[in-house]
Image: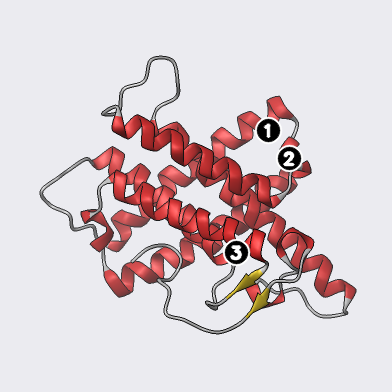
Amino acid sequence: MKKTNDQFESAITLCRNIFEKKMIDYGSAWRILRTSSLTDQIYIKANRIRSIEEKAEIKVDEGAKDEFAGIVNYAVMALIQLELGNQSNLELKPDEALELYNKHVYASMALMQNKNHDYDEAWRNMRISSYTDIILMKLLRIKQIEDNKGKTIISEGLDANYQDILNYALFALIKFEESETKYCLSINLPSTTHPSNSPPVGGRTTQRTGRGDSPPAGGD
């Protein structure tokens, strides 16, 4: 379990660093987004990951790993928005935003730890493509709950689904890190977290065919 906790911390640090830099560049502009808009942003990223997995080709220089990091940050933003609600003051200072970020990401990590105890880390035997599909499934559930004005009869609410999405995206980032380490060792290179050194998603060669101006992971 210690290994999992350490890997989670590493993946969280990667995502949090992106979030902090975006706060410096853009401030808390994301606070204008309703949770339904954040749901759609996560859906766009998850759907692109699935497209990359199926086509094994990308035309924008941003791979699946970048998108999973973006999903983590958008999920945290959604959890923060659920907590703060539609306040008239949308401004968050960087230290306030970071405090809220840590609160929700570590609450999700605690949920992961409890589920790991019960399921004995079954996620380690799953494919990254399965994480993608589960994230998409949970997004469809969230959309249905949103269409029902947030009401559920027996199912989990919005917050639990966002937490699950966050954790599955972190699982994917851990898998990418493990694959990068094995890949670099196999060719006698030092391990790095740069996406260009990642082995192919789903075991196939991912071909980059160009660069583009896609929005960076973690939200604009």
In front of the other: 16 or 179? 179
1 and 2 marks in contact (CB < 8 Å): yes
Determine if residue 194 is in view.
Answer: no
- Which residue matches tag 1? 116
State the CA–CA distance, disc 1 to disc 2.
8 Å
Q: Say which of marks 3 and 1 sits in front.
A: 3
- Does residue 218 appear to the left or right of 57 in the view shown? left
| Residue 15 in the image: above or below residue 36 | below
Q: Earlier in the sequence, mark 3 or mark 1?
A: 3
- Measured as percent of width and height from the top left, residue 83 is found at 29, 38
Q: Quadrant of the N terminus?
A: top right
- Measured as percent of width and height from the top left, residue 58 is found at 59, 73
Q: Say which of marks 2 and 3 sits in front.
A: 3
- Which residue matches tag 2? 1
Q: Residue at x 79, y 61 (%)?
A: 203
- Which residue matches tag 3? 65
Q: Secondary structure at mark 2?
A: loop
| Residue 148 in the image: above or below residue 2 | above
**Amino acid under label 3?**
Lys
- Does residue 18 appear to the left or right of 194 in the view shown? left
In front of the other: 62 or 17? 62
Which quadrant would residue 52 be assigned to in this image? bottom right
**Amino acid under label 2?**
Met
State the CA–CA distance, disc 2 to disc 3.
23 Å
**Amino acid under label 1?**
Asn
Q: Residue at x 71, y 40 (%)?
A: 123
